[in-house]
Image (cartoon, rainbow, N blue to C red):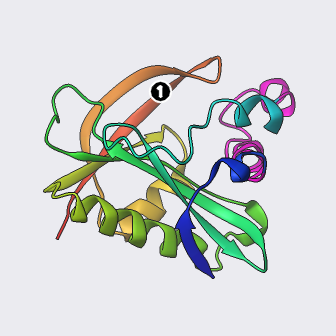
Amino acid sequence: MLIREAQPADADEVAGVHVRSWQVGYRGLLPDVYLDELRPADRAKAYTFGTRNPDTPTTIVAEEHGLIRGFATTSPSRDPDRPASGELCALYVDPSCWGTGVGRALIAEARARLSDRHFPDAVLWVLQGNERAARFYRGDGWIADGTRREVELWGIVVNEDRYRRSLP
């Protein structure tokens, strides 16, 4: 498996992973009709891969046999109360690859990149009720810090819990 920076040409494939992971992982947590109507082409338009601006999100992909199996996006924290922290903005793995180590490889590389940028710690947000994701992050040393928020993502309002962990 190769972990590399996402390029503009990866947008459609990353969007496919993004949508499939939502459709499977959030089933029962978000309305079925909403999940069924998600389209990768709509999501692909929002990506800004290849930028070198350190203040904007950057994305890495896990590629195996020429196919993108997952991705992770990091940035400086967008939370007003955590201005010195990094943030894991997204980590999604194609459902066909869950449990194969793709997620562990991506989160390790994402943490390393945030640490390389000298962030002392990082935050991430988990959809409330998404126990699979919460268990994965807790296994990687992330701890829920008690902060909750309501946010609109892709046109739907969701409730999330914040997790935090120190970086080496």
| Residue in the picture at 23% in, 65% down | 116
The answer to whether 27 is drawn above or below residue 156 in the figure is below
| Residue in the picture at 77% in, 43% down | 23
| Residue in the picture at 64% in, 62% down | 70
Check residue 23 for magenta coloring.
yes
The answer to whether 26 is drawn above or below residue 119 in the figure is above
Q: Nearer the viewer, residue 35 or 72?
A: 72
> Which quarter of the rendering shows the N terminus?
bottom right
The picture places residue 57, in percent across and down from the top left corner, at 42, 42
Which amino acid is tagged 1? Asn
Q: Is residue 167 left or right of residue 19?
A: left
The picture places residue 5, in percent across and down from the top left corner, at 53, 61
Residue, disc 1: 159
Q: Is residue 37 left or right of residue 107?
A: right
Check residue 168 for magenta coloring.
no
Q: Quadrant of residue 92?
A: bottom right
Q: Main secondary structure of the magenta part?
A: helix
The answer to whether 136 is drawn above or below residue 22 in the figure is below
Q: Is residue 72 left or right of residue 67?
A: left
| Residue in the picture at 67% in, 42% down | 26
Q: Nearer the viewer, residue 105 or 141?
A: 105
Looking at the image, how many numbered discs can be counted on the residues?
1
* Disc 1 element: strand
The picture places residue 123, in percent across and down from the top left corner, at 29, 46
The picture places residue 47, in percent across and down from the top left corner, at 61, 37
Q: Which residues are magenta?
A: 13-37
Q: Is residue 139 left or right of residue 38?
A: left
| Residue 92 in view in this figure | yes
The answer to whether 165 is drawn above or below residue 98 in the figure is above
| Residue 21 in view in this figure | no
Decide: few, some or many residues near mark 1? Use Cα within 10 Å; few <14, some 14-19, many ≥20.
some
